[in-house]
Image (spheres, rainbow, N blue to C red):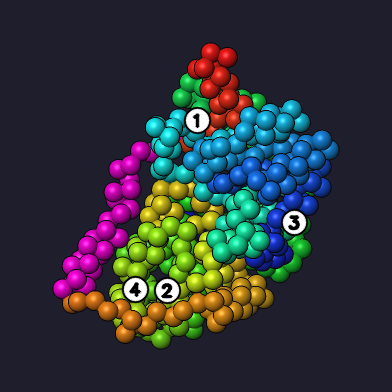
Amino acid sequence: MTTHWTLGNQMQLLENGEEFFPRVFEAIAAARQEVMVETFILFEDKVGLQLHAALLQAAQQGARVDITVDGFGSPDLSQSFIESLNAAGVRVHVFDPAPRLWGWRTNVFRRMHRKIVVVDGTRAFVGGINYSADHLLEHGPTAKQDYAVDIQGPIVAQIRGFALRAIVAGHRGAAGAGQPREALPRLTPLTHPPEAVGQMAAIFVTRDNRHHSHDIEKHYRIAIRGARQRVVIANAYFFPGYRLLRDMRRAARRGVRVELILQGEPDMPIVKIAASLLYHHLITAGVRIFEYRERPLHGKVAISDQEWSTVGSSNLDPLSLSLNLEANLVIRDHSFNRELTLKLDQLMRQHCHEVLAEELKESNWWRVVRSFFVFHVIRHYPLWAGWLPMHQPQLTPAEKLFKAGADRLGG
């Protein structure tokens, strides 16, 4: 697990698409050397077309542009969308594409869930916001509440190196599986590494299925165990492992104010059902639970005391903690912590309902049965997750998928 803090950074918290999209599109469109984008979801809607235009502009200005989308999360990009990018020199990579079976997507497990942008090796974005119009408030009651961070400083070099290695490793994995190896970006260091521009310390933390399978969870646990006053976790999909739950309960019992902001109006009903199975276990230990009922909560952020914060793509559920590829930024800075804390406090105060113990009306026998079941599921899901298919992550050029489809159809 990475524990080395990189100093000298400047970061700005971005809330929802209204703040994130203009900032990231402007940065991409101004690129002169290099753009790398990773995203779970890219839809061909208003937002996706704006990203498309920014990528084209960067490529036309001479920047090397790579975008990686997940084969499960972004399955419906049109051939014209891809071909226009390719014609400008943009390389579109698809993470583990798979054919549909009776209309169903089959590549369910071990998804590339990261949301990363790196521009010219000097600026990066990390968070939970996908490229789709449902991250804009104008989308209505189903618009998602989410966060990202705009980053400058020495930590950008680490994020850039990671993004480059992911492209190279993905195509090498595909070549090993019998696909031809594509021209790859060179793993060269920056000629002029980003200089210190601020006072913020940060750690770039990733989760994979080989060398860093528990890093993000461990950073959460360190923050919770070290907390003396307050922990606030806002997380869209909440069904964490046994150890993380134990740390939350212990913190609350020693007097730490532990507060969870979870979905009250979920985009998928099962999300609330799963999280609610844990309510009694947490509330009886002193953990306070707030359900966000304004819109679907999609954020994955947290604070601990007055210095520690994290923003990223990782939920606290079996998919993110045991299967998906994730990326979070952990930040040590009082001003950033305070800004995120104020936003979360406003969320709880204005748009949340606190779930109280007396609201959990259920019989004792059901509570015992349910607690037994939940305890053993969360205690052992890292083990059963390891039984699911694990393979070398593979990237496929998007244009090859269209060619393969045309070949199967005979034209």
Q: Amino acid at mark 4?
A: Tyr
Disc 3 is placed on an element classified as helix
Cα distance between the residues tagged 4 and 3: 38 Å
Cα distance between the residues tagged 1 and 4: 42 Å
Q: Residues within 10 Å of mark 3 (few under 14, many from 20)?
A: few
The magenta span reads 365-392
**Whether label 3 touches label 1, CB < 8 Å:** no
Disc 1 is placed on an element classified as helix
Disc 4 is placed on an element classified as helix
Q: Amino acid at mark 1?
A: Gly
Q: Amino acid at mark 2?
A: Arg
Seen at 44% across and 54% down, the residue is 320
As displayed, is residue 209 above or below residue 373? above
Q: Is residue 146 left or right of residue 53?
A: left
The residue carrying mark 4 is: 279
Q: Amino acid at mark 3?
A: Pro
Circle nearer the N terminus (1, 4): 1
Q: Is residue 285 left or right of residue 208?
A: left
Extreme right residue here?
Answer: 61
**Whether label 1 touches label 2, CB < 8 Å:** no
| Main SS class of the magenta portion in the image | helix
Q: Quadrant of the C terminus?
A: top right
As displayed, is residue 203 above or below residue 66? below
Residue 22, disc: 3
Q: Is residue 68 visible?
A: yes
